[in-house]
Image: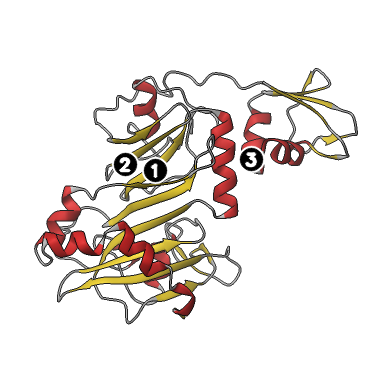
Amino acid sequence: MVNFVQTQSSRLDVALASELKISRNQATNLIKNALVSVNSKPALKPSMQLNQNDEICVKFALPKEKTNDYEANFEIPVIYEDEDILVLNKPPQIVVHQAPSVKEATLVEWLNQKGFMLSNLNGDLRAGIVHRLDKGTSGAIVVAKNNAAHAALSAQLNDKSMGRIYLALTDLPLKQECIIDKPIGRSPSNRLKMGIVTNGRHAKSAFLNLVQTDEVNLIAAKLFTGRTHQIRAHLASINRHILGDNLYGFKSENDKIKRVMLHAYMLYFFHPRSGEKVEFIAQTWDDFNQIVYKKISKELFDEKICPKSLDAAFSGIDSWMRI
């Protein structure tokens, strides 16, 4: 439970976001889930106007044990766990949280079945979820076990102190290391896709060649923003495509590659309790490795994805070409 006294006139959702250091969407979820009261009366409208000296109370309900009847018949490797956070290596083809179109068990179901205590700033369907990965994308994802950790991690997403480096296998190599700084929004020609649109949201990515061969090209990508399909849309804008990404233009024979070969390899942020900077590595999955090892030796692959090498390479991005 959190109680505070408002010091100035403001919308309720704005005041909650500021006081709890969470996003406005998360504040709206708390209000709509009837967890907020103003002067001891339930408050259900995010737009409610607060006055000076209004007393606000937020009650954090315990998350439900299950969100639906889907059984999570899979396992997810735990990279790290403490009283505040979990860091997982999400397998490919696992959806992070429920949505109307999802008819299968999700990562959140798995967390609930395992009995983890989770934050509920985003409601029960997204319990613990600070950021997400697409279904086909594998790799590191951090989960908040309590609301204080969730709020702290969300603030780092917003101020960009949380970062991610991805590995991807592409059909063509990059001409050179580059930064793509182009706005992304819903494609006007295909509502399933995102595209470069003039009125889109700011999106910035850095791309680095790691290994080039005649069939498989290993690249790394660092995100400075977190837009939907950001890496895929930015690469498509320079006519580069991730293996398996048929939505954005990759062409393959007989659909031999069953998912987008994109992996969230490194995740770093400041621990929500200690304030210490932490970094986690999610090992690549077998389907990714099988493609790599046909053209790239394991020794060379391991050398190129060494965290120290990647950190050093991305430290020089100020001199990279901007697109």
Counting residues from the N terminus, which is met first, the one under dot 3 or under dot 1?
3
The type of residue carrying mark 3 is Ile
SS under mark 2: strand
Mark 1 Cα-neighbour bin, 10 Å: few <14, some 14–19, many ≥20 = many
Whole-percent x and y of residue 73?
24, 27
Real-space CA distance between mark 1 and mark 2, rounded to the nearest whole angstrom: 7 Å
SS under mark 3: loop
Whole-percent x and y of residue 42?
76, 21
Q: Is residue 215 left or right of residue 16?
A: left
Residue at (46, 79) in percent of width and height: 319
Residue at (75, 32) in percent of width and height: 45
Residue at (50, 57) in percent of width and height: 227
User: Tags 1 and 2 in contact by the CB under 8 Å rule?
Assistant: yes
Q: Is residue 266 left or right of residue 291?
A: right
Q: Which residue is denoted by mark 2 in the rendering?
A: 90
Q: Is residue 160 left or right of residue 107?
A: right
The type of residue carrying mark 2 is Lys
Quadrant hosting residue 56: top right
Real-space CA distance between mark 3 and mark 1, rounded to the nearest whole angstrom: 19 Å
Dot label at residue 22: 3
SS under mark 1: strand
Real-space CA distance between mark 3 and mark 2, rounded to the nearest whole angstrom: 25 Å
Q: Which residue is denoted by mark 1 in the rendering?
A: 141
Quadrant hosting residue 193: bottom left
